[in-house]
Amino acid sequence: MKKLFYSLAFLLILLFACSKQTKLVELKDHKAFVEAISKNKNSFYYIDNNSYPKNRKVLPIGIFDSGIGGLTVMDAIINFDKFNNSNLSIGTDSVKDFVNERFIYLADQANMPYSNYAEVGKENLLAEHVLKDVQFLMGNNYYLSNKHENYQTDKLAVKSIVIACNTATAYGKAKVDELMEVTGLNVKVIGVIDAGCLGVFDALKNDEDGVVGIFATPATVAANAYPKTLQKILKKNGYKANIKTYQQGGKGLHESIDEDLHFIDSERIKPASDYIGPSTQNKKYLLKKELLDYYNFNTQNNGLLFNKETPNLSDTIQINSVENYVRYHIVNLLEKIREKDANLPLKSIVLGCTHYPYVVDTINTVLNELRQLKVNEEYPYKNILAGNVELIDPAQNTAKELFEYLKENNMFSDENTQLQKTDQFYISKANISNPKVETENGKFTYDYKYIVRKPNDIQEYVKIVPFSNNAISKDILLNIKNRLPETYKKINEYIVND
């Protein structure tokens, strides 16, 4: 009888422990999605935990972003060489550390930019997109093209996931971590924000006061994720000096890199009514005419649109080039520092969006110009830009964290065991087969994307398809080829000609 009592008590404790594990905290507003992925076998999003591959080391690594920006993270990973491949010890050996790994990359282009969801109060919808991105990487389903009605089921699952997006990390990683726990899938997920802050810490000297600039999407800035994480790391490591952080939300920069027509249009020759980037009319992202000499905008090729003979005479000015978005935001970041801490030097700028490494050359050019800028016999940024400003790309530390995870868990593939023979690249497209979806020229309308859609309305808003000549513009491919040649080679091996 006593033995039976203890057995029942143990069973109750076990059941209680299990119930605690499945209680939704981060995911309390996403019950419908949790139901779809873990219980509803008829759902497109269902993943059977029992059939998830047990031998995970032979699986590819998943990476996702809201667009092509995350390819900078992938490029850092595939070119990473900080360890000796023969014994996994620290030290370069001229052999890339992930040489035997295969990757699946997802660009959630249909739902981008992610940063706008937080601005309109749709953080839970943003988080649901992130959860669906993760589900895609763990699942097997994809479409051959946006026109196909039936989906394929031969995509491999992944052994780990890199969230190559700062906004997705800020608003979704905690939810993804809980999803792994409550479903029992337990796929390792790595985000870029912790990695970026570790990069800042590595670049600082313990006794030097200064400023760290956070250049990120507006949503990442609003989440305050970088300052919080950085202060936590500095405190944990006993950093003594006075370090202040200033943030600049790069409204329109990554959208312009991705050629979003609400922010940039090479065909435009005058200000547009549907433009939503920084301007002389945008109170939140005001383009200040008194700073025109500081911005030093490039007006060639309609890179700046204005409604009169010159910008100085105009009452409407809009940005229409990637370079000019950089100029606007770097000046505004320095103005924030100058206003409150003009004598503290800017030590580093965290590139808190995976698109921003595409424009590091432009950022450095602008910083050098501003260092020499003279206005009314004064150098306004002389003290702020007294020394070299290090641009911190979180991708390097992300690669390091991924390597260490695979090493600790004995999950590296070897040359002959990969189930996937080439890297794969996918992109999301508006699901024109869904009658509820509202599109214009094949893309979601702005209102439908950000206002109409609601979380927990589980449906296929998008179809995820392989990279193809129709899915990716020639200009974007050329940009990738010029900036990320190794990644471009892998895309070129995989891209579908349609």
Image (spheres, rainbow, N blue to C red):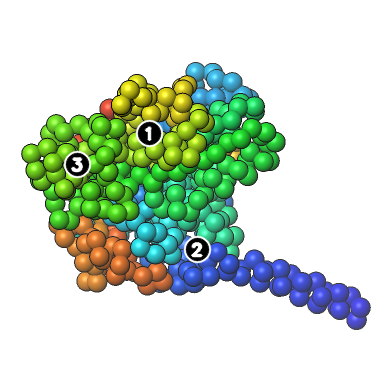
Residue at mark 1 to residue at mark 2: CA–CA distance? 38 Å
Residue drawn where x is 34% and y is 56% of the image: 116
Q: Nearer the viewer, mark 1 or mark 2?
A: 1
Can I make out residue 127 in this image? yes
Residue drawn where x is 23% and y is 48% of the image: 280
Residue designated by label 3: 320
Residue designated by label 1: 357
Which quadrant is home to the C terminus?
A: top left
Residue designated by label 2: 48
Q: Is residue 369 above or below residue 279?
A: above
Q: Secondary structure at mark 1?
A: helix
Q: Nearer the viewer, mark 3 or mark 2?
A: 3
Rendering coords of residue 85 (x, y %): 56, 25
- Residue type for callout 3: Asn
Residue at mark 3 to residue at mark 2: CA–CA distance? 47 Å
Rendering coords of residue 247 (x, y %): 45, 43
- Residue type for callout 2: Asp
Rendering coords of residue 295 (x, y %): 28, 34
Give left or right: position of 469 versus 228.
left
